[in-house]
Amino acid sequence: MPHRIALLIATALLATAVPAQAAKAPATMRVYALDCGRIEFKDLGNFSDTGEYDGKPGTLAEPCFLVRHPKGDLLWDTGLGDHFAATPGGEEVRPGVRAIVDRPLIAQLKQLGVAPADIEFLSFSHFHWDHTGNANAFAQSTWLLSRREVDVLESPHLPPNVKPDTFSARTQAKVDLIDLDRDVFGDGTVKILRANGHTAGHQVLQLKLAKAGTVILSGDLFHTRENFEQERMPVFNDSRGETLGSIDRIKRILKNTNGRLVIQHDPGDFKVLPKIPAYLD
């Protein structure tokens, strides 16, 4: 009897030591909105080159999105970086700008039964540091990158607001460069669309969901709902002309598909999205 009890205990201990199995791919596509931080600004003036925000404080949301498709997973943007979660109340990254992370991205993925190594594809709207903070955790994914974004990154002059160390795993990862648009899974449900202007190779993500219909994740084509409605843009955009062209394109797509726009940085847009483990489908 003691031997049998010891065997049962040992078996139980071994069972608890086995890593949890990755969540199975869903039968239909799901999109999870993950809270990857927020940035508080004492002055939002730089987010409109026509002066509407001068001297006004504000907060920008910093979400990430996990797209779970029957053929694989795509992580869109990686937020501020989990290291900010170690400092309650956040860190002042430059005068008047505070980065705050309440819950690490990796912990949220774990809640969904997903480990970084389980994610087949990683892509970014662009390379600004607040979108690449956790990128190095996904070196085993295939990185779907805008060729124009990479070309500028590798030019003699580093683009503003880019921190290459936050995505240095690019040199070890499998990289697939995107020249125009990309139908990720080949069925029209997940499309990376060129939307240049904020940066040279900026992109947005178009999703076609069974219940929610067409949803477009804006990247930084817009930062606020007002910027979308009134076609405002930051002073630091790479090209005003290309931005306006991209705005026109995305507005036309939204109209033609009766689609929903999620402005990633707008706290109001993020607030109304389902909270994990709930999802859009």
Image: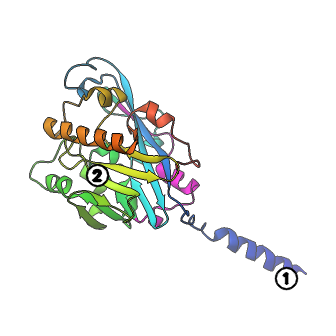
Q: Taking the image as drawn, is residue 76 in sight?
A: yes
* Residue placed under numbered mark 2 in the picture: 193
Q: Taking the image as drawn, is residue 80 in sight?
A: no
Locate the N terminus by quadrant.
bottom right
Pointer 2 local density, CA inside 10 Å: few below 14, some 14–19, many at least 20: many
The kind of residue tagged 1 is His
Indicate the position of residue 155 as horizontal and vertical percent values: 11, 54
| Residue lying farthest to the front in this orientation | 256
| Residue lying farthest to the right in this orientation | 1
* Residue placed under numbered mark 1 in the picture: 3
Indicate the position of residue 212 as horizontal and vertical percent values: 50, 46
Write down the region rendered in magenta: 98-120
Q: Relative to residue 27, is residue 211 depicted above or below?
A: above
Q: Secondary structure at mark 2?
A: strand
What residue sits 19% from the left and 22% below the top? 50
Task: Give whichever of 47, 81 is nearer the camera.
Answer: 47
Name the side, left or right, on which 92 lies relative to 88. Answer: left
Q: Tell me how the rendering is colored.
A: rainbow
The kind of residue tagged 2 is Leu
What residue sits 68% from the left and 74% below the top? 14
* Lower sequence index among marks 2 and 1: 1
Give the quadrant of residue 147.
bottom left
| Residue lying farthest to the left in this orientation | 156
Indicate the position of residue 248 as horizontal and vertical percent values: 24, 38
